[in-house]
Image: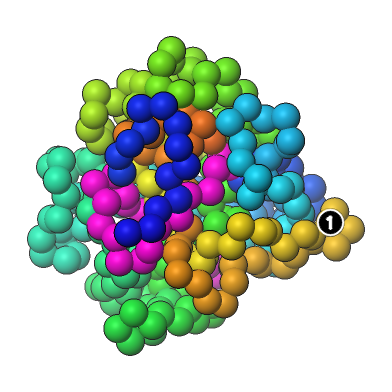
Amino acid sequence: MSTGVRGCLKCMLMVGVSVWLSSCGGDKGCPTGPPAGPGPAGFITMCAGTYQIGSPADEPGRFGDETQHWIRFTRGFLMGQTEVTQGEWESVMGSNPSGRAGPSRPVEKVSWLDAVAYCNARSSVEGLTPAYTINGSDVTWDRKANGYRLPTESEWEVACRAGSGEAFTNGPITQTECSPLDPNLDRVGWYCGNADHQTHDVKGKDANGWGLYDMHGNVWEWCWDWYNSTYPQGTQGDPVEDPAGPGSGSRRVVRGGSWSLCAKLCRSADRGFLTPGVRAGNGGFRLARTAD
């Protein structure tokens, strides 16, 4: 099993500055800064625009695959306020794979392939066009579809940061391991320093500035992208449009850290990766949709 959990003290189990620059005038309902506001129940609408992601070279706990670069979203997107819960999963899929049961806890022990199957199944239940064509382990994404999907890595980081240029959405990182507690992370996320070796109900910590919960910690969150250790180097004047990772690979990106991991692996810019068939006890996901 291949994982992207980079070594840190007591972390045995299993991107940078986000700056909003351009107006969202081209996106229906967007104000002059993100987010656009509430979307459908349980979702927040994020604006199109230009952002910088990745981490500065002096950020404590950073890794070499977090190079700062510029991206541009040509369309807005919807981001789930919480990780998909066990109750939500069971209502669609009919069973619950999680090892730490609780209807309001995030679902875990779900692979990347399980997650995209859930996206399609929930889309069908709600009368939306499924975003994915799934043929065994071969999955293609119809970007025009209005159904549920996994966020791209770039979408995830922009939503996590909520305009913050610090390591966490609410401030810098001061403690990189499990102990002592990092005071900023303690307010917004469950990690090895405060989680007591388990997941917790969603919305148990403070939301970020855009109304999203548990972007740091609780469970790893699958993203669409195949992992690549080198980002495309978009500049402020020539940002990369709608990045979605390389066309192929062996490991999918996971973001946000988890209840079992140390503070530096819960930073906004940290990039984890797992093989898409892995069902980890600290791994779940969050839904996204392309805005109409």
Q: Residue at x 55, y 57 (%)?
A: 153
Residue 270 location in percent, x, y?
A: 55, 43
> In the image, is 212 to the left or to the right of 127?
right
Q: Residue at x 68, y 40 (%)?
A: 55
Residue 69 location in percent, x, y?
A: 75, 52
In which quadrant of the rendered view does residue 236 lie?
bottom right
Q: Is residue 53 visible?
A: yes
Give, as a single range, the part of the protein colored magenta.
268-292
Residue 65 location in percent, x, y?
A: 63, 50
Q: Residues within 10 Å of mark 1 (few under 14, many from 20)?
A: few
Which of 129 and 31 lies nearest the eye of the viewer? 129
Quick check: is 271 in the magenta stretch?
yes
In which quadrant of the rendered view does residue 105 lie?
top left
Relative to 220, does residue 26 appear above or below in the rendering?
below
Q: Residue at x 77, y 59 (%)?
A: 233
Residue that extends furthest to the right in the rendered view of this protein:
237
Q: Secondary structure at mark 1?
A: loop
> In the image, is 17 to the left or to the right of 15?
right
Residue occupied by mark 1: 235
Relative to 202, does residue 284 appear above or below in the rendering?
below
Q: Is residue 27 visible?
A: no
Amino acid type at circle 1 is: Thr
Residue 164 location in percent, x, y?
A: 65, 34
Which of 275 and 245 lies nearest the eye of the viewer? 275
Dominant secondary structure of the residues highlighted in magenta in the image: loop
Relative to 74, does residue 64 appear above or below in the rendering?
above
**The C terminus - image quarter:** bottom right
**The N terminus - image quarter:** bottom left
